[in-house]
Amino acid sequence: MSNVTAIIRRHWKPLLALNCALFAATVSVALYWPRTWTATAKVILPNVTGGLDASLGTLGNLRDTGNGFTQEVNPPTIQATILKSDDVIQRVWMDDPEKDLYKKLDQYASLFKVSPKDQSTVIDIEVRGSSAEGVQARAQALLAAYQQRLNELRKDDAAVREKFSREELEASQRDLSQAQLALSKFKQATGLVNVNEQTRALASSISTLTAAQTQALGEGKAAEIRSKVLASRIGMTPEQAFGSLRLGENKEYQAIRQKLSEVEIALTDARGLYTDKNDRVQSLLLRREELLNALKQEVTKALPQGATQGMDTTLGGNNYRDARIDLIVQLIEAESTGNGDKQQAAQIQKQLDKFNTNLRSFGKDEAILLELQRKYDITEGVYKGLVAQIEQAKVNAFNSYPNVQTLDQPHVDPKPTSPKIFLIALGGALGSIFGSLALALGLESRNPLFGPRDLQRTELPVLARMPKFANPASNSELALAREDSVFQRLASAVSVMPLENQRLLVTSSTFGEGKTSITLGLALALNALGFRVLLVDGDFRKADLSGRFAAMQKMTEQLADAGQPIPIRDGLDLLRTEAKQERIGEFVLRGGLEQTIDRLQANNHYDYVLVDSPPMSLTSEASLMVTYLQNVLFVVRPGVSDRYAVTESLEQLARQNAHTIGLCINGLETRTEGYRYGRSEAQVGT
C-alpha cells in the first residue's frame, strides 16, 4: 500500500489531469450522446396439426407432421433469418424517412435485432430509432415487409414443387410400368409368383409326403411281418390260403364235398358189413370216384393251374365255423394291406421326385425374380411418395413457410433505452481506474522507484535500516530518536570508520527521503556515545534542520548571531548557515561554508561534524560540498526514492571521488519496540 501511495504522490498531476479529462468525457457522453428508443414485438409460429402420412410399400411410410423442431432444422431460426434478410430490410429501408442517415444496408440492418427463444416458437423483435414515433412505424413496416416476403416465398415454393413433382411423377410412372411388365413376364415364364411362399408350400408338401411315405412303408412292413406270421400258423402261403378260402366259399365245390363226405361215411359203414367186392361197396367206391373227379374239376375251374399245390381243400363245408378261416382272412388282409402300402409308397415317391425337381428349379430363377421384385418395389414406393407429396402440396401450402402470427404488437417504451447513465458512469469509473493504472505504470516504467534489486546493484554497504518515526520536534521525540537502538548501531558503525577530518555529509537524491531526520538522529546517538558533535544545516533553501528547533525560545534568541553554533545540549551544537538565495552556489563554491566549519571545529574541538546537505538531484550545493567534505552517508527511502535519481547521484559521487561510507535505508515497515539503551528522557535538556 505504501508503494501505491508513493506512486500516486509522485504522479498525482498527470493522474489528476487524466481523471479530469475522463470525467469531462463521461459527462459529455451522458449529456450529448444521441438518444435511442426501442420498439419490441413478438411473433409466434403456429403448431401445424395436419401432416402427410403415406405408405410407400417396402420403403416404409412417409410422414410429415408440419413444423419439426429439431437441432438440424429449427423453424424459428429460419424465420429469424428471413426477418433479417436483405430483401426484407431493404424494403423497410426504402420507405424509411430517415434512410438518408444510413449509407449502407448493413448500417440500417444493425437497427434490428431478431432473437428466437429456446425451446419455444416465439421470436422476439427489437427495433431501434431516434424517436418513439419513428421506431413504432419502423417496427410496423418490418412486420408488413416480413409477411409480404413470406407470401412470395410460399408462392415460389409451391410453383417449383409442383413443376418438379409433375416431371418426377411422369418419369416415376414410366419406370413403374417397365418394372411391372418385366416382373409379370418373368413370373409367367417361370411360374414363380412368390418364391418364399411357394418354396415354403413345396417344402411343406415334401415334408408331408415324406412322412406319409415313411408311414406307408412302415405299415406295409408291419403287414408283411403279420402275413408271414399268419402263414406260418396256418401252414400256407398267402396265395394258398387265398385259394383255400375261395374253395371254401364255392358252393358247388362245397356241395360236392358234402356228397363226397356222405359217400365216404356210407362206404365206411358198408365196408364194416361187406367186403370190397360187394356191390354196395363197389357202387359207393364208384360214386366216390365220380365225386372226386367232379371235385377236381371244380378246383380246376375255381383256381389257376397248379395253384392247388399245398392248398387246403378241406376248408369249409362243415356245419361249424372253421377257425382257420379267420386266420386266412387276416392273412389275406395283411397281404392286401402290405401290397397297398407298398403301392402308396411308390406313388408318393413319384410325387416326391416331381416336387424335388420343381424345388431345384426355383433356385435358378430366384435371384432374377428377387431383383425384379426389388426394382418394382422401389419404383412403386417412389411413385407413391411423389403422389402423396403432390396431394399434400395441394392441401397445405404452408409447410415450408408457415403463417406467422403477431403475438405482441410493437410497443415503445416512452423512456429512451440508450444511453444508459449507469453504464456510462460505470464505463467512466472503469476507464478512470484502468487508465490511471496504465498511466501510473507507464510513468513508473519510465521513472521507477528505488527497489531491493537496485540496492544490490549499488554494491555499497548498508549501515542502517531505519523504521518509520515521527519528526523529532520536541524534547521527548529527541530522546526517542537518541535512544533508538538503530541510531545507536549507526553511530557505532560511523565511530569506528576512519573519516577524513571527522566530517560526514548526509545527503540523498531527492526530497522527502528523511536525510534531515537521519542526520539529527545520528548526531544524538554520537553525542550519547560521548562525542562532541556539530550539526551543520547545509540545506540553505529549506533549512529543515534549523526549523525543527525554532520553537525553542533560547535558540530563537541566539539565532540573531549568524555564524555561531547554537547549543542544543551538552556536546551537541547546531550551526545554521545563511546565504542569499541568489548567491548560495557562490557562497559554497568560494569556501564560505568550509571556512566556517574549519574555524568552529578548530575552536570547539568537535569530534564529528555532520552536514545536512540539500538533495543531490535538485541543487548543485551538495556536489560542491562533496569536494571538501569527502565522506558521504547516502540516504534512500523505498517507495519515495527515484531509481534513476539515486543511480545518477551515486554515479556523480563516484565521479567526484567521494568516499561513500554506505547507505542508510529509511522508512521501512518494521517494529521498533525493541530494547533501547542510553540515558533517560529527563537528561535530554541538560
Image (tube, rainbow, N blue to C red):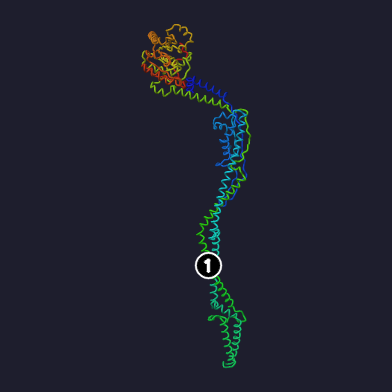
Where is residue 77? Give x, y as percent.
Answer: 57, 38
Residue at the disc numbered 1: 350
Total number of numbered discs in the rendering: 1
Quarter of the figure with residue 455 = top left
Looking at the image, residue 181 lies above or below residue 465: below
User: Neighbour class for label 1 at 10 Å: few (<14), some, many (≥20)?
Assistant: few
Amino acid type of disc 1? Lys
Report which quarter residue 624 is drawn in: top left
Could you tell me residue 336's position as x and y percent? Answer: 56, 73
User: Is the residue 548 above or below the residue 86 in the image?
Assistant: above
Q: Is residue 394 above or below residue 292?
A: above
Is 172 drawn above or below residue 71 in the view shown? below
Residue 604 visible, this orientation:
no
Q: Is residue 445 left or right of residue 314?
A: left
Q: Residue 133, located in which quarter of the rendered image? A: top right
Q: 207 and 678: which one is in front? A: 207
Residue 643 is left or right of residue 131, and the answer is: left
Q: Position of residue 388 (x, y in %)?
A: 59, 48
Q: Residue furthest top?
A: 561
Q: Which residue occupies the foreground of this view, 313 or 326? A: 313
Q: Seen in the image, is 532 located left or right of residue 46?
A: left
Along the viewing direction, whichever of 178 and 236 lies nearer the viewer: 178
Q: Quadrant of the C terminus?
A: top left
Q: Which of the two residues, 633 or 252, is positioned nearer the viewer here?
A: 252
For the point 53% across and 69% down, the residue is 346
Residue 369 in sight from this viewpoint: yes
Residue 231 in percent (x, y) is at 54, 76
Which secondary structure, mark 1? Answer: helix
